[in-house]
Amino acid sequence: MQEWNAFIGKFTKVTDQLGMPIDTDIFETVVALNALSITTVMSCGGHIDERGLLLPWVDIEMRNPTSRKSHKQYIMVSDDVDALQREVDGLRERQVNLSVIEAAQTRLKEKYEERHLLNIQIRMQQCAMRDALVQYLSRFYEGRVVSFDRRLILHRLGNSRTRMESQGSHDFYLCAPLDIQQQKLAEYQEEMRDFTHFLKHIYFSQRTETPLP
């Protein structure tokens, strides 16, 4: 419990860029994931307010010196791609010598390929943590029967971030009557809580098992 309470203390102090703390409805999910070495970077507990229907989600992303370096390289190369694309467009507009345009296009193609390889590299750096979460979800849904839209799924955001949310979060109920939206919000929050309890059980089980001699 001491280690678990340390995680709670740590994430109680976490705020977003606006200084807002982690939503109460998603707080334990964030703690449980991080306790199992799955790093969260953003989350939402779900709301119905002036922004409309917002259903619960958690974003995970591996963050270490290697991944940060890859991100910086990716941004730099992307800037080079944009600059070279503008150069090629400008050369075409001015109708300069074809060989000059082709040389610029060759440099642009090389930068595109470099960015593509960096993109794959960044995505691969996320594999271990994402795969661990996939395994937890697979075990959670063994024998568990819930509606299709309620099931928790994962999908990639950009080239490094993975979001966990219910299938129905993809605008299934954006135009539904308010009572249906409230029902779905409650269902999806319950699904996230149930998964959180499952993760907590795994976490505490790992710490009470008798070590092998």
Image: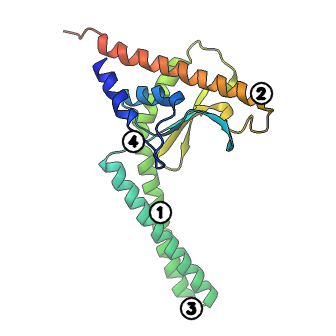
Mark 4 to mark 1 CA distance (whole Å): 24 Å
Looking at the image, which residue sits at the far left?
213
Q: Return the residue at label 2.
A: 179
Q: Secondary structure at mark 3?
A: loop
Residue shown at the point (23%, 11%) measured from the top left: 211
Front-lying residue, 88 or 210: 210
Q: Which residue is mark 4?
A: 62
Residue 44: name its quadrant: top right
Image quadrant holding the C terminus, namely top left
| Circle 3 crowding by C-alpha within 10 Å: few under 14, some 14–19, many from 20 | few
Q: Which residue is mark 1?
A: 113
Residue topped by disc 3: 97
Q: Amino acid at mark 3?
A: Asn
**Circle 2 SS class:** helix
Q: Is residue 54 visible?
A: no
Decide which of tag 4 and tag 1 comes sooner along the chain. 4
